[in-house]
Amino acid sequence: MRLQGQVAIVTGASRGIGRAVAELFAAEGARVAVVYRGNREAAEQVVTAIAQRGGIAKAYQVDVADFAAVKNCVEQVLADWGQVDILVNNAGMIQDGLFLQMEPEAWYRVIQTNLHGTFHFSRAVVEAMFRRRRGRIINISSVAAERANRGQTNYAASKGAINAFTRALAVELASRNITVNAIAPGFIETDMTQAVRNIAGEQIQKAIPMRRLGKPEDVAKVALFLASEDSAYITGQVITVDGGLSLGGIGS
């Protein structure tokens, strides 16, 4: 098992990409902290699914936008399992709207969850990783950071900042054997992308050279690579997982 004996925190782990990451990491031997904000039932379903396959997981409720709550959450994980080896900053949200119609609250909430949440958990775990001189921080970004979409100024800003944060933090932590990388998914079949997929329909798949939407497992497998020793000499990178969408070509 590639993550045997390690402890992983996965935020936004009650559904979608986060759930796929949590289940895959547990299958590879990690003890997984399933972090969720509001849906306790969904989080407990993930924990149960992991346990049924022989894995170890525990649900932790926290709003990633609340730094004090995040610190308490990480302290509880350390109390429960004694270490944190891997952090996957997956929790995120969208609140789309044209800029002229966007209320400040829609901007603040997306930035607070996506960007501030990434900072909060990274800041909370890094001291424990420093002490052990080892760690993996994996930030879930988006192709929206580079590929502009109407109505997503807040979301694109948050994900673009995550990319820059990833590179800058990687430089600071590299000497302690802590790698920091990001994954930029394209259109993945999750609840969060459902509204966009309902509006765009088949046009989305036509824009993707591989002619299919991504699955949460497609992203989870890249996260596993970045969490494992196979990626030990990779840091500060943003890996795109989008079926070729960001290439901008026209498929045959």
Image: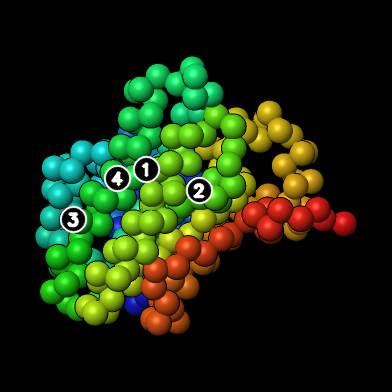
Write down the residue under mark 3.
124
User: In the image, what residue type sits under mark 3?
Assistant: Ala
User: From the viewer's perspective, is 223 left or right of 213?
Assistant: left
User: In the image, what residue type sits under mark 2?
Assistant: Ala
- Do the residues bearing badges 2 and 4 touch, measured as CB atoms within 8 Å? no
State whether residue 58 appears in this view. Answer: no
Compared with 90, 241 (above or below) is below
> What separation in Å lies between label 4 and label 1 (alpha carbons)?
6 Å
Horizontal and vertical percent for residue 97?
A: 52, 24
Horizontal and vertical percent for residue 69?
A: 17, 42
User: From the viewer's perspective, is 219 left or right of 3?
Assistant: right
Compared with 17, 197 (above or below) is above
Nearer-N-terminus badge (4/3): 4
> What separation in Å lies between label 3 and label 2 (alpha carbons)?
25 Å
Write down the residue under mark 4.
117
Residue 114's label in the rendered image is 1
Label 4 Cα crowd, 10 Å radius (few <14 / some 14-19 / many 20+): many
Nearer-N-terminus badge (3/2): 3
User: In the image, what residue type sits under mark 1?
Assistant: Asn
Nearer to the camera, 15 or 163: 163
Secondary structure state at the residue bearing disc 3: helix
Residue 145's label in the rendered image is 2
Marks 1 and 2: which is nearer the front? 2
Compared with 106, 224 (above or below) is below
